[in-house]
Image (tube, grey):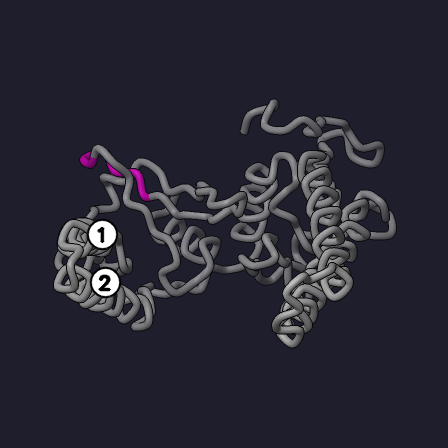
Amino acid sequence: MQADAHSSHHGCPLLEDSTSFMEEFKLNKKHVTLMKGCLIVFILFLALGFALPFIPDENNEKPNGTLFVMIMCTVLFGFLAVFTWLTLRKLPYVDIASDDDGIWYLHIGKENGLVSWGKISRIKERACLQCLDLLDCNGERLLRVEYQLNGFEVIRNIINEKNSSINPVFHQSKFSKSPLYHLFYLTSVLGFSALGIYVGSNGNPVLGYGAMSVLVVVIIYEYFVTATGVNICNGYLEIVYPLTKRNVPFSDIEDIRILDEFNKGNRMPVVWIVSKKSKKPFKLRHIGADSNVIYNSLRAVVKM
């Protein structure tokens, strides 16, 4: 763990225990600025939608169409504005701190808000909300950890280490993508192939047979090189692909990590299996369970 992993990462000894160090994780200020900018944009579009019926129309055509657009703008941008405003109200209260005793919200303080590590039974990823929920044994949320915290990777590793050392890991021997994943790729290949044939046979062969063929090849390639599952076997991990399987002995595994990929600003956790005999790590994403569950299960069985 690096000391400069985040700007608010402190090592301050607590008074009650000189061997216990508190670490603070605060919200990235850029995220607050981005949310404020989004709120302004949504409000402007909402105002524009309200103003549409009052904008002069020289042709005075399709008044019902203008009314429909106004309603759509009001509903869509009104919802987005309210959601963003409510999110902004919560942001001052998402900063957290942790030490050997547990984790708590900074604005509440340790004395009143401590969630001990022993109370945390499960870690639940919320991809749409971009956060982790820490749950007790009854599935009730104890605390939420936002992905936008400075040093999120550090606190995620701390939570996983503390949780795995206190709570037993119930091994799931198989993780795999759902049938819908395979159906999606099959539908995409058939759909774009049919579209290419239609466009090509109707006077545009370059776009139809050329561009669509390239797109279909890219989709097929992406499907076949993406791991669709992992099986925990006796002494090795079996990485499953659509047409092949790769066996990775425990003795060859250097490390198992959780790293993040970013898509349009959204953080997407991916489990990496780093092997001594492979130039590239094996990447496991969206294979039927939270990345934290896969990460802890694999590390437990490989004994890392």
The reply to whether the C-beta atoms of the residues labelled 1 and 2 are less than 8 Å apart is yes
Instruction: Using the image, determine if residue 232 lies above or below residue 71.
Output: above
Foreground: 157 or 302? 157
Q: Visible in this render: residue 148?
A: yes
Tell me the distance, in whole angstroms, between the alpha carbons under discs 1 and 2.
Answer: 8 Å
Query: Residue 262, which numbered label?
Result: none
Query: Horizontally, is 300 left or right of 114 in the view?
Result: left
Q: Specify few, some or many for label 1: CA neighbours under 10 Å numbering under 14, 14-19, or 20 or more.
A: some
Q: Quadrant of the N terminus?
A: top right
Residue at point 61%, 41% (across, down): 155
Query: Horizontally, is 97 left or right of 174 in the view?
Result: right
Foreground: 5 or 61? 61
- Residue bearing the label numbered 1: 215
Tally of numbered discs: 2
Residue at point 26%, 60% (across, down): 231
Q: Visible in this render: residue 99?
A: no
Find residue 175 and report its horizontal and vertical position in percent.
33, 63
Q: Is residue 277 magenta?
A: yes
- Residue bearing the label numbered 2: 192
Instruction: Using the image, determine if residue 42 lies above or below residue 23.
Output: below
Find residue 87 and report its horizontal and vertical position in percent.
74, 54
Instruction: Using the image, determine if residue 273 lies above or below residue 133.
Output: above
SS at badge 2? helix
Instruction: Using the image, determine if residue 290 lies above or below residue 10.
Output: below
In this view, the residue farthest toward the front is 59
Q: Quadrant of the C terminus?
A: top left
Query: Horizontally, is 300 left or right of 125 in the view?
Result: left
Instruction: Kindly identify the amino acid type of the residue bearing the numbered disc 1.
Output: Leu
Q: Which residues are magenta?
A: 273-278
- Quarter holding residue 273: top left
SS at badge 1? helix
